[in-house]
């Protein structure tokens, strides 16, 4: 730890507390959505388009309806009166954004492979799936629009009702003349074009939903493998036209999300509408190959980035032009994803002039939306790759170009040229620590030795210094971006009559360990054992308010709400204790569950006694409500800005093109550290996902618009054998924007690691004149680049 | 078809469709939902169980093929008294799981692997678990857990 004092002196915060979630998950006791026993449930199956772009000439469901076990088969026409509105998009980023109406089943036309065409309900899952094959669909095929620049040209318009493939153009150009001037006067410029390939998020648990109607009264319980039970409840009410008071949404154990479960999906909407229609429980669980086409994809951008620099290599302007792939429709926050990166294309560098433009287009592919990092990995990739390009141009090292351009520590809080205020940071110290840990000099010597010796396996060292905005988000800032909701988080802390403590949170964990971390926050404040605290979440009947879990927000926003609620409960307990002891509140000390009178430690009143007093209400101070609980909704005043140095070391086999990641080091600064065990786990997993984008994963389409990497046999989620162990370090710069001083860590690894790996590959090969390789850097791509570079 | 097998020490007998996979037999017919289904190409390993003590992806086997065999699922790994298996303990102590969906398969694969190779190197653990995918942990702490379990079980 370098700078903080906040967590020193803590008893619980900062400790490597083992997760209380684990025993259930380790013994098979935990219930994921598909594990729930739901007697009498109908099984739903969705017939999906096998073509990317076509008019539906006819659908014949009669044969399917007569199959054994089939209860009903519906198409768009059969259900068109069952909706109160189209599928929701909650982020209309501009007033004139084009958003074609999107319903759970295709209305006369399919727009991507995987688009829902018909739905079957049957008494068993096998009967439902078998019946899909008996549905006859005649398609009149249309040419698909698959490439982004082709889409922009508008020669083939997907949604004729909006007349264009361009959903919106969004600009952030505070001073165009200044940017132009900086480029005109630049001693060095670089102009780079990068492709962010589409990715399939691939949470290990497929999506799953079950809707159980109450026999009387019209209430519905929706169980869903979702990251956003609260948002889902609101959106289901609006889309299906059921009063919010009749809906309860529960997210049971959820097997990872990575943004892909931050959505409102057709199957959730269908299951609810059909449970209402048939008055029977309806359940559905996705097949993996269905997941590949029917769950959102991530990334999908063409990035053009230009840097202008003076003769010292100090960057004076950055200009970015993006084309972003929305896919066939706008899902919940699809259009907002490029905006989450839009403010970060200057990275950690003090760049005075800024220009960002994004044009977002429709294609005949699966809709895109949030995928771990959401916009910020793309921004970090572009600036960190471009900084290496600038270093080559200027003739200095990747280390030196960064050091010349870092935002200096003295400038924090830093007002960026993109209009944000960065909370805190000391980039140089973090970088120096990372370089020390790595042993950069030895690696550089080894790299040179191999080149000089003509070794088959070359070494490359890639640096990525990232910053992200997370802790989503101040509601007023979201309003300025036209986001359709707030960014606050809710918490209730209550001390029960027997002095056990209930914490109710609006966050919705799906692997992050909130039950452990939230207990630690309360235990720290109250000095009570962790075992006395239970954390309730992910059920709108128990935790009615919340904004759920995404965008590395849960600790910074939800954890802060819990911290504040705990303080208020303690204050109330103190008032009760003071009343009982007949002293002034300011005369009381508190430690480890006991109030004592200052100077007379034998005069004590335990917290447990205050809890019981609040319960009996026999002798409370006048006017005090008989409870010992506090509910808080906390809206953060700013984003948080975690950062860190990530360095990848690769070995490139020049004969086969194979890249081996042999070392990976991350020195992250996520502010104060609540549970290092969980932090490290988040960093490890994040790194693996970012490395996977660099080396392995791509949602590849053929020329007809078929996803050809639609199974886990074709889409290469890395296994343990493809990755090394990771080397982690940390610095700690507390955030001044929340009471815990935390910043967030859920997405950091993914944001940082992709450019680190790609910079390392280019570094290994740059003496051959190679400056770029597209992702994923497969052996074939790398081999072709080496062959082309060495042929002449 | 009638199939009979031992599952976690208990004899179970059910009438199933011939096409029923072992994983669906365990989940839907026996009600043991700890074994998860993560894919449809036998790629992810979430459904790994032990058949006669050896790791098998239970989506690669029909229930009828398991007739007469002894199956152990994640529910049967801890002792009858509820004491966690050393591998389960190692996963908790080393934070070898996050969302926990791949975990049952990962733990079953890892225990079987250690039977074959009780003193593995890190590289051997990584290769040994190649058939089990995890999206949360980056494998770092899974590998650490398996090495720790190997040490604990060797003592």
Image (cartoon, rainbow, N blue to C red):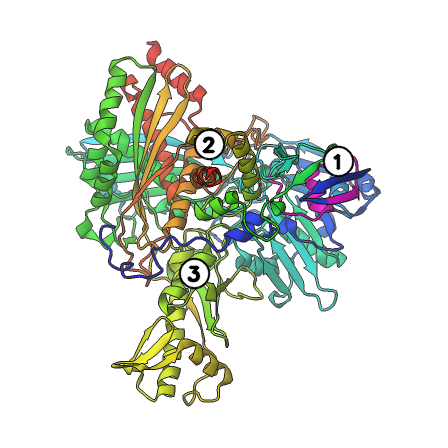
Question: Considering the numbered disc 3 on the image, is that residue within a helix, a strand or a loop?
Answer: helix
What element does badge 2 sit on?
loop
Residue at figure coordinates x 56%, y 66% from the top left = A542
How many C-alpha atoms fall within 10 Å of the one at disc 2: few (<14), some, or many (≥20)?
Answer: some
Magenta span: B11-38
Residue A669, magenta (yes or no) = no
Callout in the foreground (1, 3): 1
| Residue A518, disc | 3
Q: Residues within 10 Å of mark 1 (few under 14, many from 20)?
A: some
Badge 1 and badge 3 in a common chain = no
Q: Residue furthest front?
A: B155
Circle on res. A531: none
Q: Distance of mark 2 from mark 1, alpha carbons?
A: 32 Å
Q: Circle 1 sits on which residue? A: B68
C-alpha span from label 3 to label 2: 38 Å
- Judging by the rendered image, the residue that carries numbered circle 2 is B119
Quadrant for residue A764, please give it. Answer: top left
Which chain letter matches label 1? B
Residue A568 visible in the picture: yes
Viewer-side label of 3, 2: 2
Q: Is residue A90 left or right of residue B65?
A: left
**Which residue occupies the foreground of this view, A659 or A674?**
A674
């Amino acid at each position: 730890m370098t700078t903080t004092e906040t967590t020193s002196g803590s008893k619980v915060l900062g400790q490597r507390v083992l997760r209380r979630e684990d025993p259930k998950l380790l013994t098979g006791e935990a219930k994921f959505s598909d594990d729930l026993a739901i007697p009498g449930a109908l099984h739903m199956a969705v017939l999906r388009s096998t073509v990317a772009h076509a008019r539906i000439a006819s659908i014949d469901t009669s044969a399917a309806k007569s199959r054994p076990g089939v209860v009903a088969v519906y198409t768009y026409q059969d259900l068109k009166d069952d909706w109160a509105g189209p599928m929701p998009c909650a982020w209309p980023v501009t007033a004139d954004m084009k958003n074609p109406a999107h319903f759970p089943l295709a209305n006369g036309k399919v727009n991507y492979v995987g688009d829902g065409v018909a739905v079957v309900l049957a008494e068993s899952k096998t009967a439902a799936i078998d019946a899909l094959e008996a549905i006859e669909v005649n398609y009149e095929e249309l040419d698909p629009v698959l490439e982004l620049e082709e889409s922009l040209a508008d020669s083939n318009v997907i949604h004729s009702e909006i007349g264009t493939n361009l959903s919106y153009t969004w600009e952030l150009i505070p001073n165009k003349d200044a940017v132009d001037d900086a480029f005109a006067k630049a001693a060095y410029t670089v102009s780079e074009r990068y492709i962010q390939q589409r990715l399939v998020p691939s949470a290990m648990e497929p999506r799953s939903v079950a809707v159980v109607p109450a026999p009387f009264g019209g209430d519905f319980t929706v169980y869903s493998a979702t990251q956003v039970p609260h948002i889902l409840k609101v959106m289901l009410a609006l889309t299906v036209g059921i009063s919010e008071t009749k809906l309860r949404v529960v997210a049971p154990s959820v097997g990872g999300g990575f943004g892909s479960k931050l959505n409102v999906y057709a199957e959730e909407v269908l299951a609810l509408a059909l449970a209402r229609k048939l008055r029977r429980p309806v359940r559905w669980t996705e097949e993996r190959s269905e997941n590949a086409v029917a769950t959102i994809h991530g990334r999908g951008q063409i990035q053009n980035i230009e840097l202008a620099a003076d003769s010292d290599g100090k960057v004076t302007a950055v200009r970015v032009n993006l084309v972003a792939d929305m896919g066939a429709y706008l899902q919940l926050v699809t259009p907002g994803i490029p905006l989450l990166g839009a403010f970060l294309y200057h990275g950690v560098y003090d760049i005075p002039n800024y220009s960002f433009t994004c044009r977002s287009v429709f294609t005949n592919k699966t809709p895109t939306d949030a995928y771990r990092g959401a916009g910020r990995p793309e921004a970090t990739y572009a600036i960190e790759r471009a900084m290496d390009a600038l270093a080559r141009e200027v003739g200095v090292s990747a280390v030196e170009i960064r050091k010349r351009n870092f935002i200096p520590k003295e400038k924090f809080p830093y007002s960026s040229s993109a209009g944000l205020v960065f909370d805190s940071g000391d980039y140089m110290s973090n970088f120096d620590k990372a370089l020390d840990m790595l042993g950069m000099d030895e690696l550089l010597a080894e790299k040179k030795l191999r080149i000089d010796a003509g070794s088959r396996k070359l070494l490359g060292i890639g640096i990525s210094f990232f910053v992200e905005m997370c802790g989503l988000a101040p509601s007023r800032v979201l309003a300025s971006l036209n986001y359709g909701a707030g960014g606050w988080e809710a918490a209730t802390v209550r001390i029960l009559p027997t002095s056990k403590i209930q914490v109710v949170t609006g966050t919705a964990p799906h692997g992050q360990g909130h039950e452990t971390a939230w207990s630690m926050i309360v235990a720290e404040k109250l000095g009570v054992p962790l075992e006395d605290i239970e954390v309730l979440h992910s059920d709108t009947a128990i935790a009615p308010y919340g904004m759920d879990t995404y965008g590395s927000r849960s600790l910074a926003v939800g954890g802060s709400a819990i911290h504040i609620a705990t303080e208020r409960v303690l204050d109330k307990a103190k008032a009760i204790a003071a009343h009982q002891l007949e002293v002034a509140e300011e005369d009381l000390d508190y430690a480890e569950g006991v109030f004592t009178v200052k100077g007379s430690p034998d005069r004590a009143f335990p917290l447990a006694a205050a809890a019981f007093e609040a319960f009996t209400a026999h002798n409370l101070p006048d006017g005090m409500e008989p409870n010992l609980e506090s509910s808080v909704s906390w809206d953060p005043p700013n984003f948080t800005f975690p950062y860190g140095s990530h360095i990848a070391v690769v070995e490139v086999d020049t004969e086969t093109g194979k890249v081996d990641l042999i070392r990976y080091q991350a020195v992250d600064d996520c502010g104060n550290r609540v549970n290092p065990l969980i932090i490290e786990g988040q960093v490890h997993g994040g790194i693996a996902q970012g490395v996977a984008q660099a080396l392995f994963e791509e949602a590849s389409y053929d020329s007809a618009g078929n996803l050809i990497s639609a199974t886990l046999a074709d889409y290469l989620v890395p296994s343990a054998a493809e990755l090394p162990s990771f080397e982690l370090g940390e610095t700690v710069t507390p955030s001044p924007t929340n009471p815990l001083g935390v910043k967030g860590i859920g997405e950091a690894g993914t944001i940082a690691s992709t450019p680190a790996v790609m910079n390392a590959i280019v570094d290994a090969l740059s003496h051959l004149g190679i400056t770029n390789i597209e992702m994923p850097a497969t052996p074939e791509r790398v081999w072709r680049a080496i062959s082309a570079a060495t042929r002449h | 078809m009638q199939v009979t097998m031992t599952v976690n020490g208990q004899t179970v007998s059910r009438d199933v469709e011939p096409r029923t996979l072992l994983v669906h037999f365990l989940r839907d017919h026996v009600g043991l939902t700890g074994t998860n289904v993560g894919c449809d190409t036998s790629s992810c390993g979430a459904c790994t169980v032990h058949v006669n003590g050896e790791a098998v992806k239970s989506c690669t086997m029909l229930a009828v093929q398991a007739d007469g065999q002894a199956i152990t699922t994640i529910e049967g790994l801890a002792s009858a008294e509820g004491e966690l298996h050393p591998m389960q303990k190692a996963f908790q102590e080393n934070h070898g799981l996050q969302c926990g969906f791949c975990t049952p398969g990962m733990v079953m694969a890892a225990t079987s692997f250690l039977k074959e190779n009780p003193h593995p190197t890190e590289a051997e653990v990584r290769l040994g678990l190649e058939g089990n995918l995890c999206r949360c942990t980056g494998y770092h702490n899974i590998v650490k857990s398996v090495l720790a379990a190997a040490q604990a079980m060797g003592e």
